[in-house]
Amino acid sequence: MSLNVPDALSRTRRRNAWLGYLLLCLLLAALPFIADAGLGRSWVRVLDYTLLYIMLSLGLNIVVGYAGLLDLGYIAFYAVGAYLYALLASPHFGLHLPFWLLLPTGAMTAALFGVLLGTPTLRLRGDYLAIVTLGFGEIIRIFLNNLNAPVNITNGPQGVNLIDPVAFGGFSLGKTHMLFGVTFSAAHQYYYLFLLLTLAVIFISLRLQDSRIGRAWVAIREDEVAAEAVGVNTRNIKLLAFAMGATFGGVAGGLFAGFQGFISPESFNLMESVMILCMIVLGGMGSIPGVIFGAVLLTVLPESLRYIGDLQRAALGRIVVDPADLRMLLFGLALLAVMLYRPAGLLPSGTRRRELAAENGVAEQEQASVYDARR
């Protein structure tokens, strides 16, 4: 009988795990209707943008969290995917290519740009790599802003509008549909599409994390010289990290263009790259649950703080502090608090937690040795 106890415990744990997954799936399926009923249709769009930021954060997590390559121009790949979709599915060039062709094309084009960025930066590390990637992101934005003369390619600062919504055959997600007596607005339909693709990105990230390639990325992050010494092809592995991260950015960009219906270079500025990097740092670099939590927190929290103005008006009769300024102040204070008290992030990976513990232990030993030497 005692031999069957572990089997019974494992079956119970598996059953509880599957029950938890089922409840989570039901919650995610009902979430847009809960948000619509409780907070309004605008919050369904907030959920849509949250899923897009999760995809972007998971893509940048491959470059920063796994491979340890600081990339401040990641938003450029988002722009590449968005503009490729917009230019080929709008009246700008008179082309209206189907969604199933545009999305993989945008992903592959973004991956190509990722390789183009990674190739000249193979020998760079740390601050130098950050400066080069920052410049790359700004170059892409400036090109998009100025490629309207002498030949109008991107329509310059006016952007591209009247972009075709995502459609599967004759079924367009930009229109309201009725199914089993339930009304699905465009925001609801995009939510389910984004959710499916976000789950696919999470699955790919999990498989990469546990693969030989993922371990090679971690080896490069820890010590590139040692990784090369044990046979890791650092050049190809780093290029693969840039390409994979850019692929996720290209997919998110194409979805953004079809969902928004209008894009301009101002949607892809430096602050967007910084915000995505903050999501990773806040949640925990290299931790998929942490990255998801950071993306959700930094997307939903600023929107929640919009109500501060109404609260001030209700309590004081007037607005004392501008809500936009207060939002950024609270955002900065939150980042400072996390960096001081949770430097590994809110939901760090086990590897990252052990690294920080080891670094703290080495620092304490060095301080003790200096103190003994002075004595």
Image (cartoon, helix red, strand yellow):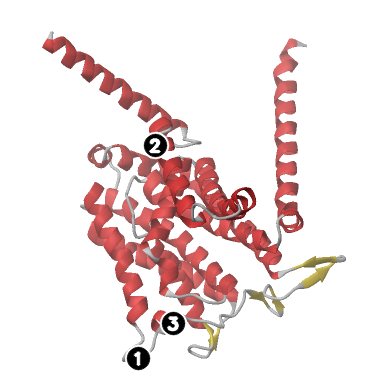
Q: Earlier in the sequence, mark 2 or mark 3?
A: 3
Quarter residue 159 falls in: bottom left
- In the rendered view, would you say 172 is above or below 184? below
Distance from disc 3 to disc 1, alpha carbons, whole Å, reads 15 Å
Q: Position of residue 250 (x, y in %)?
A: 46, 65
Residue at numbered disc 3: 158
Q: What kind of residue is marked 3?
A: Gln
Left or right, 30 with respect to 345, comes to right
Q: Which residue is mark 1?
A: 151
Give the number of the mark in front: 3 or 1.
Answer: 3
Q: Is residue 190 above or below residue 98?
A: above
Q: Nearer the viewer, residue 302 or 135?
A: 302
Q: Secondary structure at mark 1?
A: loop
Which residue is outermost to the left?
374
Q: CA distance from mark 1 to mark 2?
A: 47 Å
Between discs 1 and 2, the one toward the N terminus? 1
Q: CA distance from mark 2 to mark 3?
A: 39 Å
Q: Is residue 263 visible?
A: yes
Question: Residue at position x 27%, y 22% from top?
Answer: 362
Image quadrant in which the N terminus is located: top right
Task: Describe the element under mark 2 as helix, strand or loop.
Answer: helix
Q: Regarding mark 3 in the picture, which secondary structure is present there? A: helix
Q: Position of residue 151 (x, y in %)?
A: 35, 91
Residue to which mark 2 is pinned:
339
- In depth, the one of 329 and 104 nearer the eye is 329
Residue lying at the far right in this picture: please name it: 181
**Do the residues under discs 2 and 3 have CB atoms within 8 angstroms?**
no
